[in-house]
Amino acid sequence: MRDKKFAAGCNRDIIRQGAELVGLDLPAAIAVCIDGMKPYAAETGLLPKA
């Protein structure tokens, strides 16, 4: 989130507001999102390249 080149098209304010709405700090909210996507990594193309 600090590097403006990373996910440049994202609205960082919306991401921060979403974390606040669910009562989490930003790192915790991001961790919840990543953990929630893990079961679907293969079908969404998010698996690391071999």
Image (cartoon, rainbow, N blue to C red):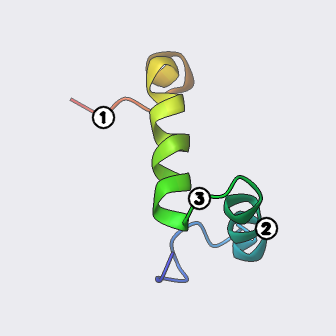
The correct choice, above or below, for 4 with respect to 28 in the image is below
Which image quadrant: the C terminus?
top left
Q: Earlier in the sequence, mark 1 or mark 3?
A: 3
Q: Who's the residue at 56% across and 25% down the image?
A: 44
21 left or right of 5 in image:
right
* Kind of residue at badge 1: Pro
The correct choice, above or below, for 41 with respect to 22 in the image is above
Q: Earlier in the sequence, mark 3 or mark 2?
A: 2
Callout 3 secondary element: loop
Q: Between 46 and 13, which is closer to the camera in this rendering?
A: 13
Callout 2 secondary element: helix
Q: Residues within 10 Å of mark 2 (few under 14, many from 20)?
A: few
Task: Give the alpha-carbon distance from disc 2 to disc 1, as whole Å.
Answer: 27 Å
Q: Who's the residue at 44% across and 27% down the image?
A: 38
Check if mark 3's residue and mark 2's residue have beta carbons within 8 Å: no
Check if mark 1's residue and mark 3's residue have beta carbons within 8 Å: no
Check if mark 2's residue and mark 1's residue have beta carbons within 8 Å: no
8 left or right of 27 in image:
right
Residue at image mark 2: 14
* Kind of residue at badge 3: Leu
Q: Position of residue 37 (x, y in %)?
A: 52, 30
Q: Who's the residue at 77% across and 58% down the image?
A: 21
Residue at image mark 3: 24
Q: Give the number of the disc on residue 48.
A: 1
Eye-nearest disc, 3 or 2: 3
The correct choice, above or below, for 11 with respect to 50 in the image is below
Total number of numbered discs in the rendering:
3
48 left or right of 37 in image:
left
Q: Between 28 and 42, which is closer to the camera in this rendering?
A: 28
Callout 1 secondary element: loop
Q: Position of residue 39 (x, y in %)?
A: 46, 18
